[in-house]
Amino acid sequence: MKVCIVGPSGAGKSTIAVELARTFGISTYEFDNIYWDTSGAEFVKNTDEWMAQAIEKIIEQDNWFVEGAYDKRMYRLLVECSLILRVEVSFGVRAIRLIKRFIHSTMTGKLPRETFRSTVDLIKFSYRFDKRLSRFLSGDSALMRKVVSVHDTSSSIEAIRATGLC
């Protein structure tokens, strides 16, 4: 089973991925950990070469869940997967989740640190993301056939079972 979970920041992709991994006993990968070097105090973008190698290591495996906000570098994973779960949650809910994440990160001193400015940028990105993802997916009929809209873990499990992946 190879499944990509896509959606805007704050939609709950990571939570869904962790719960699906636990339910099905399959490894999960956050695209943020491929895109960003999170080993320091600040977020630093990984090189395209590093990202490509990390993606190849995932693709070589028989089963995986990969979650992330779509980026062109994620395309190879989208092509290789059997199912694309598109997490759709209202913008208001996403914005509140992102603000809570920033507050929690600030209060706990989590590294790499999130700044108020980066949180505002993330909220703006989340707002624009749905239209961008719709345009991208509608331009590729092979990917569109794999897309199922979900809103939480239960609907994700139903979608996986309905497609016969488990």
Image: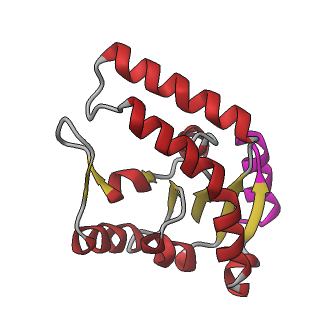
Q: Residue at x 47, y 70 (%)?
A: 74
| Above or below, 76 relative to 13 | below
| Above or below, 24 relative to 48 | above
Q: Residue furthest left?
A: 40
User: Horizontally, is 100 left or right of 73 in the view?
Assistant: right
Which quarter shows the N terminus? bottom right
- Residue 42 occupies quadrant: top left
Which quarter shows the C terminus? bottom right
- Pick whichever, 125 or 65, lies toward us: 125
- Residue 118 occupies quadrant: top left
x and y percentages locating residue 61 in the rendered image: 41, 69
Q: Residue at x 46, y 36 (%)?
A: 119
- Pick whichever, 15 or 26, lies toward us: 15
Is 164 magenta? The answer is yes
- Pick whichever, 90 or 84, lies toward us: 90
Q: Residue at x 35, y 31 (%)?
A: 115
- Residue 11 occupies quadrant: top right
User: Horizontally, is 35 left or right of 156 in the view?
Assistant: left
Residue 19 visible in the shown view: yes
x and y percentages locating residue 44 in the rendered image: 24, 51
Is 61 magenta? The answer is no
| Above or below, 104 relative to 43 | above
| Above or below, 60 relative to 99 | below
Looking at the rendering, the stretch of residues picked out in magenta corresponds to 150-166
